[in-house]
Amino acid sequence: MADTVIRAEGLGKKFIIGHKIERDGLLREAMTAGARGLFHKATNFFRGRSIDNTDGRTEEFWALRDLNFEIKRGELVSIIGHNGAGKSTLLKILSRITEPTEGRVEIDGRVNSLLEVGTGFHPELSGRENIFLNGAILGMRRAEMRRRFDEIVEFSGVGKFIDTPVKRYSVGMYVRLAFAVAAHLEAEILIVDEVLSVGDAEFQSRCLNRLSEVAGSGRTVLFVSHNFAAVAALTRRSIVLEGGRLTFDGPVDTGLAHYTASLGKPGKVRDWGRGKDASLISAKLVDGAGMATENFTPGTPLRLHAVVETTGMPGMSFVVILRDQHNLPIGLYSSASFNNVPLPTVAGRYECRLSLDPLFLAAGEYSVDLQTTSTATIVDHRVDGAVQFFVNACSPGDVGYDFRQDQGTGHLALRLSAPLEFVLMPTAEAPSLHSERRLG
């Protein structure tokens, strides 16, 4: 169809990992691979070993496999997936940085990409020179570049340093200029990867507004971010990758739900270890009906159920530390400090039911550390990242707030919305330390 600007059919990308590296035809990579091979052969020779090649000790890794999709002109599409799901590999194929191993991709129009900080910039050239260089690469005439130049510089906010070599720029300056160039040059397709991970809130907001304007002008935007609120606010369609395969293609809200649901699939059981007097056995986030969940809705109580085994030592307490996606602490609850509710003094295994006051959390990923302590300063048992959960929506009940997380600059008051409960678990119901699946 005339409106289709990207079509992928049976797209796959294979890498060879181990002692042998894949060569993409670059002279530097070929020389590196050759030097590495000579070094191994010389080492083996002087050690009296056979000089056989190392091809037998390699492994095929498919970063992408059998991808099929179409993207229309003017669409805003987010690409979602875990780290290692194949997002960056797909963007590099679409940006013509690397070739697929199998299948094909058809692209109708010029592509401008911002995949990494300063992609396409020459460090020895000034900001001004790099702007014109990027325009020339896209096939734009110098007159077109002059017309866009002032707008690019104003958006980037680096006008004072525009004639300074970009190698002297800070990371923030680098990415602001790189985004300004990518978003203002006349390319039909714009590919942006994690640009919102750098820069302050004001710049991030301008980035989102600019991407919306780009799509509104009829151009196509592919957007990759782990910021769920930005994804939901900017895009209407999402493509979800898992293990290099396309597992969902449809409305962004459904795609985000599909992605977060995939995070709950059983994985490797983690050994939480044991404490001396009070051991944490397992933990989970639950919804209003008491069912395990990995999604939290802002403006509702945060409910945790944890299984704790105690020897009955008096004065033991239960501690919850809430962390944001940067692993910075943003809230603390201690049963000793706030409510003076110690762990039970009768030995046994208990389910601790904790319900905290409603929290208005920004969208993103959060984790919960759990501790049992014997005093305010002595930790008996500690499990970092015992529970992980996600916030998909950033404006529940029409309450507006910033789409990004606070990055740990403030601390939330974590207080109980209901009395803390310790329910003794019958032996038959108490989960086994070795057979139970632990969240987190």
Image (cartoon, helix red, strand yellow):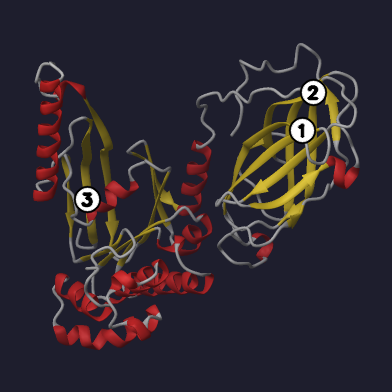
Quarter of the rendering occupied by the C terminus: top right
Q: Which mark sits nearer the N-terminus, 2 or 3?
A: 3
Q: Secondary structure at mark 1?
A: strand
The residue located at (70%, 40%) in the rendering is: 287
Residue count near mark 2 (Cα–Cα under 10 Å), binned few <14, some 14–19, many ≥20 = some
Residue type of the residue flagged with mark 2: Asp
Please tell me whether residue 397 is drawn above or below residue 86 in the rendered image.
Answer: below
Figure quadrant of residue 183: bottom left
The residue located at (79%, 23%) in the rendering is: 277
Q: Which residue is mark 2?
A: 277
Image coordinates of residue 25 in percent, x first then y, are 9, 47
Residue type of the residue flagged with mark 1: Thr
Q: Nearer the viewer, mark 1 or mark 3?
A: 1
Residue type of the residue flagged with mark 3: Ile
Q: Which residue is mark 3?
A: 93
Q: Are marks 1 and 3 in contact (CB under 8 Å)?
A: no
Residue 102 lies left or right of residue 239; in this view the side is left
Q: Are marks 2 and 3 in contact (CB under 8 Å)?
A: no
Please tell me whether residue 78 is drawn above or below residue 210 in the rendered image.
Answer: above
